[in-house]
């Protein structure tokens, strides 16, 4: 929330307390910028929102409070009632321009806010099995999760970025068996690939590399030992590749938690015993079941099968318990669309074990369809496999890949247009945004002037200047809202509009006018404030701000 919005909101709250004894009206008060600037710079619908509470006509309520607001909102030039009870604020030009000094003084920190109030949040995302390379679905979730963490940190949350490594259970057994089969193939021996194993080029290449290093050495060892070797080595090599690809994609993690470690530490047994002791389970058909229907699930779930092995759910419960034990108050998971049905059972387990019902939130990542020249692209032209993160980034660049994934809400299916991503035109949204930044840098370079900050910027009276000033001031509230709703696409929307506002300002106003040095200084300061804001917004998305294009 910017300085002007805060002033207006506090004035409204104070007036409502004095007039109607409404001591807690914070959730009712909303201030926004009207689409039509002729209606003012800011507007509130508080009179309509209070109509039912006060049992009065909104226009009467507006008339009762507007005179008080005129005395309390010092930065307002005029405050008028419009339509059914809207209250519109036209601000003094000097108050709108105050944002310039705020932006320039705060620099890289402009946009940061304290809405999170230090809440400890653990965000788990990607968490792909270490059995292959990362593909498009992972790319969308990685860009989104990373940007959400950037937004949360900028909004005052205490954030941990975590990757949960699924390195125990059947998928790792299948990886070891698949590598062993390919190793035998490399040695010219008979081999049988498991039907549910991994048949892709990744596994074949790792096996070939291991054969070149070790020759037939492993073939002379007991099969059980060899399989353990392949399980561990395959897991380590593929996880290292995942880490390298994510780093290349500008996604860094604070914590990598291994499912195998969770099991070896006895946390799964401990979580299971805790559920038994709490009376959350029962035995049936020699298996142990969780009474999940008592907590909103559609059916009870098996925790330990009749053969004595745990289901996938049990170590996942133990992992989430471990998150709480580390002091995190809010858990956020980004899961693929195929995990949608998994959410109720995990939420049921969290609630049953005594944690707040809303302490776990799961956002679903919908599918991505890669499109080129209007046709779907299913396979890599180079390898014949699914297109990977690295291949996509090598083709169109990391900036473009991340920005495109962040433009669309996560819960919508997405067509990723490769043809558009390759274009160097304003039709490409990331090019449009970066070009605006490069243009600002060019303007500042050509002026080659040392900016002089002023107490007021009274010469910035053009409509295009006013629009740009108001939009700059809204950035901290956009960041706070994007963090709260976990919606980086709101930042991409902001960036596109900010670029448009700057281009309009650039076209309408002569920024560098040697014949008017005072106006030039004020306009250069506005350009610099825009540059800083645009760069900060791009940084929150993990996208570079190039000074030249």
Image: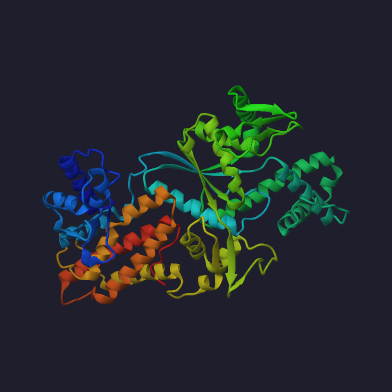
The residue drawn where x is 68% and y is 50% is: 131
Does residue 271 sit above or below 463 in this rendering? Answer: above
> Which coloring applies here?
rainbow
The residue drawn where x is 63% and y is 63% is: 387
Asked if residue 337 lies left or right of residue 200, the reply is: left
Q: Is residue 73 visible?
A: no
Q: Quadrant of residue 388?
A: bottom right
Query: What is the x, y in percent for residue 280?
Result: 60, 27
Query: What is the x, y in percent for residue 161?
Result: 50, 45
Query: What is the x, y in percent for residue 217?
Result: 83, 47
Asked if residue 405 lies left or right of residue 313, the reply is: left
Does residue 239 sit above or below 473 in this rendering? Answer: above
Closer to the camera in the image, 366 or 100: 366
Query: What is the x, y in percent for residue 39?
Result: 22, 64
Q: Quadrant of residue 279?
A: top right
Asked if residue 387 lies left or right of residue 207, the reply is: left
The image quadrant where one finds the C terminus is bottom left
Closer to the camera in the image, 283 or 388: 283
Asked if residue 273 lies left or right of residue 209, the reply is: left
Q: Residue furthest right?
A: 190
């Amino acid at each position: 929330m910017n300085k002007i919005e805060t002033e207006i909101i506090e004035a409204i709250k104070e007036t409502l307390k004095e007039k109607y004894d409404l001591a807690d009206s914070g959730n009712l008060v909303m201030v926004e910028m009207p689409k039509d600037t002729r209606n003012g710079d800011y507007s509130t619908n508080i009179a309509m929102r209070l109509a039912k509470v006060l049992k009065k006509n909104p226009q009467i309520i507006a008339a009762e409070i507007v005179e008080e607001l005129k005395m309390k909102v010092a930065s307002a030039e005029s405050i008028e009632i419009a339509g059914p009870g809207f209250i519109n604020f036209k601000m003094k030009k000097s108050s709108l321009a105050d944002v310039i000094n705020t932006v320039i003084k705060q620099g890289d920190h402009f946009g940061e806010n304290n809405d999170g109030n230090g809440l400890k949040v653990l965000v788990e995302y990607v968490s792909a099995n270490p059995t292959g390379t990362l593909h498009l679905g992972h790319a969308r979730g990685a860009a989104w999760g990373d940007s959400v963490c950037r937004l949360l940190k900028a909004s005052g949350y205490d954030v941990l970025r975590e990757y949960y490594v699924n390195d125990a259970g059947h998928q790792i057994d299948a990886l070891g068996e698949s590598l062993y089969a390919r190793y035998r193939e490399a040695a010219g021996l008979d081999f049988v690939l498991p039907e549910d194993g991994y048949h892709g080029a990744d596994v074949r290449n790792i096996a070939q590399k291991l054969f070149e290093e070790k020759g037939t050495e492993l073939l002379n060892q007991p099969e059980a030992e060899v399989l353990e070797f392949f399980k561990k080595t395959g897991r380590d090599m593929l996880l290292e590749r995942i880490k390298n690809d994510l780093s290349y994609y500008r996604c860094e993690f604070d914590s990598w938690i291994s499912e195998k470690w969770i099991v070896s530490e006895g946390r799964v047994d401990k979580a299971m015993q805790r559920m038994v002791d709490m009376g959350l389970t029962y035995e049936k058909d020699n298996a142990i079941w969780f009474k999940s229907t008592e907590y909103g699930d559609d059916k009870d779930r098996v925790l330990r099968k009749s053969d004595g092995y745990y289901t996938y759910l049990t170590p996942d419960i133990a992992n989430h318990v471990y998150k709480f034990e580390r002091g995190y108050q809010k858990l956020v998971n980004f899961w693929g669309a195929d995990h949608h049905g998994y959410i109720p059972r995990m939420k049921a387990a969290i609630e049953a074990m005594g944690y707040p019902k809303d302490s776990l939130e799961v956002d679903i990542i919908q599918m991505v369809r890669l499109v080129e020249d209007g046709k779907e692209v299913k396979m890599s032209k180079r390898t014949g496999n699914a297109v990977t993160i690295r291949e996509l980034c090598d083709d169109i660049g990391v900036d473009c890949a991340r920005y495109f994934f962040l433009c669309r809400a996560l819960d919508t299916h997405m067509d990723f247009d490769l043809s558009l991503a390759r274009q160097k035109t304003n039709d490409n949204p990331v090019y449009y945004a970066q070009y605006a930044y490069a243009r600002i840098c060019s303007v500042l370079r050509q002026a080659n002037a040392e900016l002089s900050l002023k107490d007021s910027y009274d010469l910035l009276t053009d409509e295009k200047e006013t629009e740009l000033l108001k939009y700059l001031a809204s950035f901290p509230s956009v960041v706070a809202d994007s963090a709260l709703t976990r919606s980086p696409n709101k930042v991409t929307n902001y960036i596109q509009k900010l670029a448009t506002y700057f281009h309009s300002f650039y076209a309408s106003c002569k920024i560098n006018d040697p014949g008017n040095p005072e106006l030039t200084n004020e306009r250069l300061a506005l350009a610099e404030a825009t540059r800083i804001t645009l760069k900060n917004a791009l940084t929150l998305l993990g996208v570079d701000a190039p000074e030249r294009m």
